[in-house]
Image (cartoon, rainbow, N blue to C red):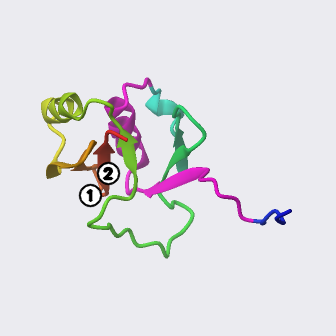
Amino acid sequence: MKKALPVKNQMNGVFVHVTNLKISTKWYTELLGLDVDLDKVVSPVYNIPLVGTTSLTLDDHTFDPEFKHSISPSPIFNLYAPNIEEAYKYIKDKGIEIVREIERVGDTAWFNIKDPDGNVVMICNC
């Protein structure tokens, strides 16, 4: 019998580092069709309610004066979109910056967008 490891094969959450918590909260909740009372968004973090076991936490580092925001040119996570063409049109209609057009490998398709801080997020059908 294998011994249980102290670190599990499970992702609990993704942290997205932002510079303005309310602007980012509004952007992500609108993207996902969620309601939010921005008066209840209080620094330093806001947890976007997601379906499933993985959480999405926006963090503005209010209590970390040494923090310097930097972005990765690669996606930091992906959001699920079963119909990639429909998702692409939705993103275009919202005026969200698309930084990589739809790509396909077999049945997998994706494209990349930028959030208000320049963080790259992938929209993917799997």
Under circle 2, the secondary element is strand
Q: Residue furthest front?
A: 1
Residue range corresponding to the magenta coloring: 7-35
On the rendered structure, is 52 left or right of 76?
right
Nearer the observer, 67 or 79: 79
Residue receiving disc 2: 121
Residue 125 lies in the magenta-colored region: no
Q: Quadrant of residue 24?
A: top left
Residue type highlighted by circle 1 = Gly
Depth check, mark 1 against mark 2: the one in front is 2
Label 1–label 2 contact, CB within 8 A: no
Q: Residue furthest bottom?
A: 66
For label 2, count other residues whose C-alpha is less than 10 Å away and answer few (under 14), some (14-19) or many (20+): many
Nearer the observer, 60 or 125: 125
For the residues labelled 1 and 2, the Cα–Cα distance comes to: 9 Å
Q: Looking at the rendered structure, which numbered label has been put on residue 118?
A: 1
Residue 77 in the image: state x and y as whole percent.
Answer: 40, 53
Under circle 1, the secondary element is loop
Residue 91 in the image: state x and y as whole percent.
Answer: 20, 35
Residue type highlighted by circle 2 = Val
- Residue at image point 41% right, 40% down: 25
In the rendered image, the quadrant that contains the N terminus is bottom right
- Residue at image point 14% right, 37% down: 95
On the rendered structure, is 111 left or right of 124?
left
- Residue at image point 70% right, 59% down: 8
88 in relation to 61, above or below: above
Q: Is residue 8 visible?
A: yes
